[in-house]
Image: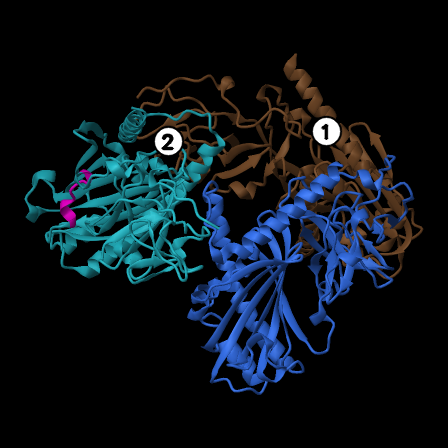
Chain colours: A blue, B cyan, C brown
Amino acid sequence: MASKRFDQDTLPSAVQASQPWPRDAWYVACTPDEIDGKPLGRQICGERMVFFRAGNGMVSALEDFCPHRGAPLSLGFIENGSLVCGYHGLAMGCDGRTTGMPNQRVKGFPPIRTFPVIERYGFIWVWPGNAEHADAAKLRHLEWAESDAWAYGGGLYHVNCDYRLMIDNLMDLTHETYVHGSSIGQKEIDETPVKTRVEGDEVVTSRYIDGITAPPFWQMALRGAGLPDTGTVDRWQICRFSLPSSVLIEVGVALEGKGGYDAENTSKVYGMVVDFMTPETENSHWYFWGMARRFAVQDTALTETIRDGQGKIFAEDMEILHRQQDNLDRFPERKLLLLNIDAGGVRSRMMIDKAIAAEAANAGG
Amino acid sequence: MASKRFDQDTLPSAVQASQPWPRDAWYVACTPDEIDGKPLGRQICGERMVFFRAGNGMVSALEDFCPHRGAPLSLGFIENGSLVCGYHGLAMGCDGRTTGMPNQRVKGFPPIRTFPVIERYGFIWVWPGNAEHADAAKLRHLEWAESDAWAYGGGLYHVNCDYRLMIDNLMDLTHETYVHGSSIGQKEIDETPVKTRVEGDEVVTSRYIDGITAPPFWQMALRGAGLPDTGTVDRWQICRFSLPSSVLIEVGVALEGKGGYDAENTSKVYGMVVDFMTPETENSHWYFWGMARRFAVQDTALTETIRDGQGKIFAEDMEILHRQQDNLDRFPERKLLLLNIDAGGVRSRMMIDKAIAAEAANAGG
Amino acid sequence: MASKRFDQDTLPSAVQASQPWPRDAWYVACTPDEIDGKPLGRQICGERMVFFRAGNGMVSALEDFCPHRGAPLSLGFIENGSLVCGYHGLAMGCDGRTTGMPNQRVKGFPPIRTFPVIERYGFIWVWPGNAEHADAAKLRHLEWAESDAWAYGGGLYHVNCDYRLMIDNLMDLTHETYVHGSSIGQKEIDETPVKTRVEGDEVVTSRYIDGITAPPFWQMALRGAGLPDTGTVDRWQICRFSLPSSVLIEVGVALEGKGGYDAENTSKVYGMVVDFMTPETENSHWYFWGMARRFAVQDTALTETIRDGQGKIFAEDMEILHRQQDNLDRFPERKLLLLNIDAGGVRSRMMIDKAIAAEAANAGG
């Protein structure tokens, strides 16, 4: 009944090599409230992980697999800073090594895989790839998440499509007219051309629409900021993709003729639509969405109102994305059009492919 | 971001070659009420199609695939006679060519596949095969669908079995005794032999049962026609299969000794059980069922009563057909018996196989 | 339309050779109430079977496949001692030969496979393997099922995991502390080592825990037997695995210091947890569970109370077993630990493997 000792770096991975995502990168794994007092099981980039807050307050991520009999550790509980398996009581430390088990000597137990984790900006971030490459400095700075000048609210959806279809969706807001006609969409959006460019490590697709009536969402924002909501405005949408998988969208309206995007803060309302897409499998992902705003930041009721509104809007996207994925699965050989409005998604995918190729080259060298 | 131009006849098909159905044939696709003011997505003979009524009132059928990003066009809406994609507003004409898109030149957009369509006899018919072979003259004439001497009511079921199991079912009404004992079945049915023959392009299985008590359905029909419902009757069931996939069943009873099938109209009640089986996949089909009758044709309440009764009866068939399909999948190597009562189904399948083989030979030549 | 005659011993089996269970063995198939007046379809060891009680009162088991058109015979009914197919009325005898069919000569119909069956101890037992090897003497004697000194109550669960995971579960009751903390579990269980040994054709894992407070279930049992429920007791759990797949667990408590397991009946309460695991597929099984007890045997209300309690407890196991199976499917290459507490499951699996190998050698000779 002896157990063989494994080295941690030779543990077999449950995930294949040719995945459509970079592995050596920080992905949003969950929000702190999801691991409040209990472990959370979540599959990320094909890896089944369990997240928990150990005794020292630090968050850990491990393979969600008890080395004893293979039960998911996420069914267990936290005790004395260890994650205790809910089947037979094996206690697992945050380093992937068994810390105890009733009536057993555990020194020879094989370790399980750990994943680097950072808690910052209101999220738990995980590095699903090679732990030796993990580098906290590679986590992008998010100003809106740390400054009192901003307010934030958001949510999480599980979406049954390739995470890249969501990137396409967000890097081309033309769809707002059709999918979100009753809230943020308006006809002028798809009548205005977009410009796509690469700026450093970002793909940027921008659209400026001048002299229009504000759609309902922005009328609400103008009122919230004490500005008139009935006149005409200049509107902007600047979508910024960055690796591995976020789209941050600068959005706002300024009273007409006050300078648009560059207007004084007293003449405009603006914010940032926040979108983190974390792959689960090749055909599904976790979608962390939200809005950071620079107006009426003390108004917590407004935060809830916006969150509810966004939740409804993104649910409309989910419906069409599920159906799009399903249709693409049925017509696997069909090529899609790549129009001007699609440039943002196309460029983002090129950046992703380049990162995947660089990882492969790195692994082979 | 240019788009390559495709020729329509080289578009890849989502469907494999060796399908268990003739492709060059008219199948019932839907009923007009299903496309009233909105498009309908439906998979037929393995092809995902969208049906819609364009500005000219004509019905069109296209691949249910937006050439832009692959969303199902059936999620969209009709505007100015075009089918507008609900994702980014691409407008598709009934010829499979893009008619417009906000802020885009669409001349170079690849066409999508169209399917020949006819609207007639209260149904929309589609030709899933080679459009060049489509011939309206090949649609069989349905007298009962055009004459005021007949009344019709029907419905639609989605059935999880090979459409040929439903043909077997309908070409051998012996099962009525067992599956439909409480409505149309009666012991005398399976005590009376059937005769099966090929008449021109039809397979005909007939059964004549003389001097019996009418089962509940026919007692109701006799009362509806003002005839006595308590005496004995002569009953007939004449099942007619024709390509690609319909079974029309002449059914009726005459007061005993008045000539049976050939009795005067004043001594009999009769009608036509209407069954169109449209393959969806190899293991599922759309079942358009109904009854045309020559008695009490003004009585619309009776039409509803019969429709309700048929709906319940065919639901009984669905249960056993689902389970039969499931069982056949589990015992794939077992040969089935081919009894006398099965001759109708066997002959019908031979006719189907011959049509498939002829298409294959035609395609190869 | 002639039918070819098959010999019964050349009938193809729907099941592959390399199954993870012995085939030449008696498995619990169902309980008598499940075939009361109607046939029962159930898949056992990969074989779809139909069980029914024929005219002579004997239980029969056949392939659940009508030789006519492949419908499941279990959808039919019993008439004149035969099992009548619910589709077209083929009547099947308990020897797998067609006894009649309306308007048909059935002499040439191919037989279907029969399975040896025994009704004993309140269960129907089936032999899924080679019928020629079936031997009633190989059915183990169950004293508690025949003696008035015992009362029995039980139930049936369908469990989505390999039946051997349930054997592991039952041969190591350490999990009671974690999975069943609110009922039968208690901390002392996992603090007490177990001993595992092979006794003849049984694997026995035993644990004796002296001088503890009785957990809620046993307090209830003590009260039911008129014994004090607040003092300390000596407790035992003796798990006995035997082929093909049962775990019978002697359980009980005696008032402390009265001799424990060997105490007089007036100082102890005890019983037998009964577990028969019948494989359905490689990843699912039928779990017949129950409890035979030697105390308060006349108290039928107590039988129901215990049954309810066991039902809730085993439902807790099902949850973790489903998740364990799912996790093992995701990490197929990971080896599990084999600890001291796992010895019972390990030894039981060795006995199973040996029986499978012996069958294979037997078949090859």
The Cα atoms of the two marked residues, 2 and 1, are separated by: 40 Å
Residue A158 x %, y %: 60, 58
A312 left or right of C252 in image: left
Q: Which residues are magenta?
A: B138-145
What label sits on residue C352 in the rendered view? 1
Which element carries disc 1, helix, strand or loop? helix
Q: Amino acid at mark 1?
A: Ile
Badge 2: how crowded within 10 Å, few (<14), some, or many (20+)? Answer: many
Name the subunit of mark 2.
Answer: C
Of the 4 image quadrants, the one containing the C terminus of chain A is top right
Q: What residue is drawn where x is 85% and y is 52%? A: A93
Q: Which residue is more in the foreground, B95 or B351? A: B95
B77 left or right of B153 in image: right
From the viewer's perspective, is residue C312 above or below residue C2?
below
Give yes or no for contact between labels 2 and 1 (Cβ–Cβ under 8 Å).
no
B113 left or right of A52 in image: left
Residue on which disc 2 sits: C90
Q: Amino acid at mark 2?
A: Leu
Q: Which residue is more in the foreground, B26 or C336? A: B26
Q: What residue is drawn where x is 46% and y is 35%? A: B327
Q: Which residue is more in the foreground, B243 or C133? A: B243
Residue C45 x %, y %: 60, 32
Sooner in the amino-acid sequence: mark 2 or mark 1: 2
Which element carries disc 2, helix, strand or loop? loop
Residue A286 lies in the magenta stretch: no
* Quadrant in which residue B319 is drawn: top left
A162 left or right of B20 in image: right
